[in-house]
Each structure stands twice: as structure tokens, then as C-alpha cells.
Image (cartoon, helix red, strand yellow):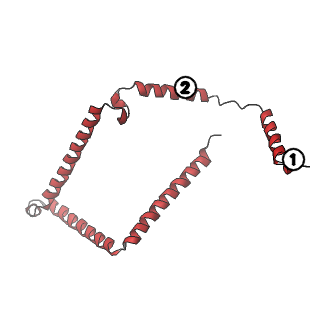
């Protein structure tokens, strides 16, 4: 009767063989890497609040940062709107500002391209657009998974 015929005997045989093997030693650099990570974690917790993660900032600093960010966003948007209004002035494109004529021509060309794209998007059925988005997300996830698999296959530590 062979050991393969009885799964319990085979399991005991393999278990005994594995128990008899000598224990593998950890790599020599493992201790140094672990100690370096522990020291790095200690440095992070000892760092001042502005060098730590946003979650660890004091509440006042977080609120101030959010208010300042909102202000900067408003400032940038206001600048963009005023620049667009400046380029739309009809009198600036005549005579004394020939460079703005080229900018105005480029802006009208861009506007025509946007209008064309909008009409094309309206002509495509909604189901097709949803299908295209689902296909794009599926392809992205597949590519991400294949990249992960390739990385783990090529660079996996033994």
C-alpha cells in the first residue's frame, strides 16, 4: 500500500519530513532593515506637527489650511475669469495689439473645437458612453493587475 493511497498517512509523512528540516535563518540584513523602520517611525512621531500627516495637525491649523486653500482657489479662478474677459474685448484686437489678434483667433478656434465636440457627444447614445467608460475602467484595472503581477513575478524577494 503506497502512502498516496491514504491521505492521513501522507499528511503525517510530509509533516514529519518538514519538521525534521532545519529552520531557515533570516537574511542578514533583516535586523538592520527592521531597526531602520522602527527608528524612522520614531522620528515621524517626534517630528513637529507641520512635518507630519495632515490628520495629525491641530484642528485650528487644519481649518486655517482649508480656508487658505479655498482663498487661493478663488484667487486663481478670479484671475482666469479676468484674463478671459480681457481677451474677449473687441477693441484690443484692433491695430495697436496685433499679438492679441492671434490669441483671439486661437480662442475662437478652440471654441469651435469645443462646440464640435459637444455636438458629437450629444449625437452618441448615452448607453454607448457608459459602455465606453466601463470598458476604460475595466482596461485600466486589468492593466494595473497585470503590472502588479509582473512586478511580483520579476521582483519578488525569496
Q: Indicate which disc residue 95 carries.
A: none
Element on which disc 2 rests: helix
Residue at 60% in and 26% down: 31
- In front of the other: label 2 or label 1? 1
Q: Earlier in the sequence, mark 2 or mark 1?
A: 1
Numbered circle sitting on residue 3 = 1
Q: Which mark is residue 35?
A: 2
Q: Nearer the viewer, residue 38 or 27?
A: 38
Q: Residues within 10 Å of mark 1 (few under 14, many from 20)?
A: few
Residue lying furthest right: 1
Report how far apart the C-alphas of labels 2 and 1 lie in the structure. Answer: 46 Å
Describe residue 58's horizontal placement relative to residue 151 as left or right: left
Q: Secondary structure at mark 1?
A: helix
Res 122 quadrant in image: bottom left
Residue 100 locus on image (x, y percent): 15, 60
Q: How many marks?
A: 2
Q: Is residue 94 above or below residue 147?
A: below
Question: Residue 80, image x and y in percent?
Answer: 19, 53
Q: Residue at 81% x, 48% y: name it.
A: 7
Q: Is residue 76 left or right of residue 17?
A: left
**Residue 154 rendering spot, x and y as whole percentages:** 61, 47
Apparent side of residue 6 relative to residue 116 in the rendered image (left or right)? right
Residue at 55% across, 55% down: 146
Residue sitting at x 49%, y 61%? 139
Image quadrant in which the C terminus is located: top right
Q: Is residue 29 above or below residue 6?
A: above
Quadrant position of residue 58: top left
Residue 28 image offset from top left, x and y in percent = 64, 28
Instruction: Give the residue at the far bottom of this rendering.
Output: 123
Q: Are marks 2 and 1 in contact (CB under 8 Å)?
A: no
**Label 2: few (<14), some or many (≥20) within 10 Å?**
few
Amino acid at each position: 500500500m503506497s502512502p498516496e493511497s491514504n491521505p492521513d498517512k501522507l499528511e503525517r509523512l510530509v509533516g514529519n519530513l518538514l519538521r525534521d528540516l532545519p529552520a531557515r535563518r533570516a537574511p542578514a540584513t533583516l535586523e538592520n532593515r527592521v531597526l531602520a523602520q522602527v527608528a524612522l517611525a520614531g522620528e515621524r512621531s517626534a517630528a513637529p506637527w507641520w512635518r507630519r500627516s495632515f490628520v495629525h495637525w491641530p484642528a485650528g491649523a487644519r481649518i486655517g489650511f482649508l480656508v487658505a486653500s479655498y482663498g487661493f482657489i478663488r484667487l486663481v479662478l478670479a484671475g482666469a475669469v479676468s484674463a478671459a474677459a480681457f481677451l474677449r474685448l473687441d477693441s484690443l484686437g484692433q491695430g495697436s495689439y496685433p499679438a492679441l489678434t492671434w490669441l483671439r483667433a486661437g480662442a475662437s478656434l478652440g471654441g469651435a473645437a469645443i462646440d464640435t465636440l459637444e455636438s458629437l457627444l450629444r449625437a452618441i447614445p448615452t448607453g454607448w458612453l457608459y459602455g465606453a467608460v466601463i470598458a476604460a475602467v475595466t482596461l485600466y484595472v486589468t492593466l494595473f493587475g497585470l503590472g502588479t503581477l509582473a512586478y511580483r513575478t520579476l521582483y519578488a524577494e525569496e
